Amino acid sequence: MTSVVAGTHAIIWYLLEDPRLSKAAGYAFDAATSAGQMIYIPTMCIVGMTYLTEKGRIPEHALPLLERVLASPDSPFHPIELSLDIANAIKRISRDTVPDMPDRVIAATALASGLPLVTRDGNIRASGIETIW
């Protein structure tokens, strides 16, 4: 299995072992880590988690859990910061298909990285980029 880029809900549900995570998504994360590959977390997901925590839509302990796994030196989870390549890839994600800019940034992160995106987001999955769900 290859490395993957994680969408916001996918990584939250994976870390919390939430049954809403699809079997294919869980398999992609498990296969990447067991093969010594990385699970990349767009920093936009961290911003999104902060927002979702403030709105009470995700458990308060989800973001600190992600921060701990990202800080661990032997963790398979690594952040991907917004770069010029990602900013330019946003132009390849149709605003008509994916109207929310944070979702476009996450999709563009996967696109610029050349990796599949693990996401439940139907708009992103309809955008034509490689996704797993």
Image (cartoon, rainbow, N blue to C red):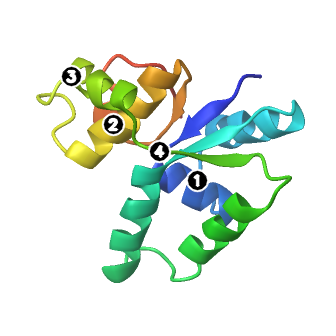
Name the quarter where the N terminus is drawn.
top right
Choose the circle earlier in sequence order: 1 or 2. Answer: 1
User: On the image, which quarter does residue 91 sit in?
Assistant: top left
Identify residue type, mark 1: Ile
The secondary structure type at the circle numbered 2 is helix
Q: Secondary structure at mark 4?
A: loop
Residue 12 in percent (x, y) is at 56, 61
**Label 1 environment density (alpha carbons within 10 Å; few <14, some 14–19, many ≥20):** many
| Residue of label 1 | 11
Q: Residue at the spot x=33%, y=36% of the render? A: 122
Q: Where does the image place residue 115, in percent across and percent down from the top left?
A: 56, 22
Q: Which residue is mark 4?
A: 81
Q: Which residue is mark 2?
A: 122
| Amino acid at circle 2 | Gly
Q: Between label 4 and label 1, give the one nearer the viewer.
A: 4
Q: Which mark is residue 2?
A: none
User: What whole-number distance in Å separates the C-alpha atoms at marks 1 and 3?
Assistant: 25 Å
Q: Nearer the viewer, mark 1 or mark 3?
A: 3
Counting from the top left corner in percent of width and height, residue 14 is at: 65, 55
Mark 4 residue crowding within 10 angstroms, few (<14) / some (14–19) / many (20+): few
* Picture disc at residue 91: 3
Indicate the amino acid at tag 3. Answer: Lys
Q: Earlier in the sequence, mark 4 or mark 1?
A: 1
Q: Nearer the viewer, residue 132 or 72?
A: 72
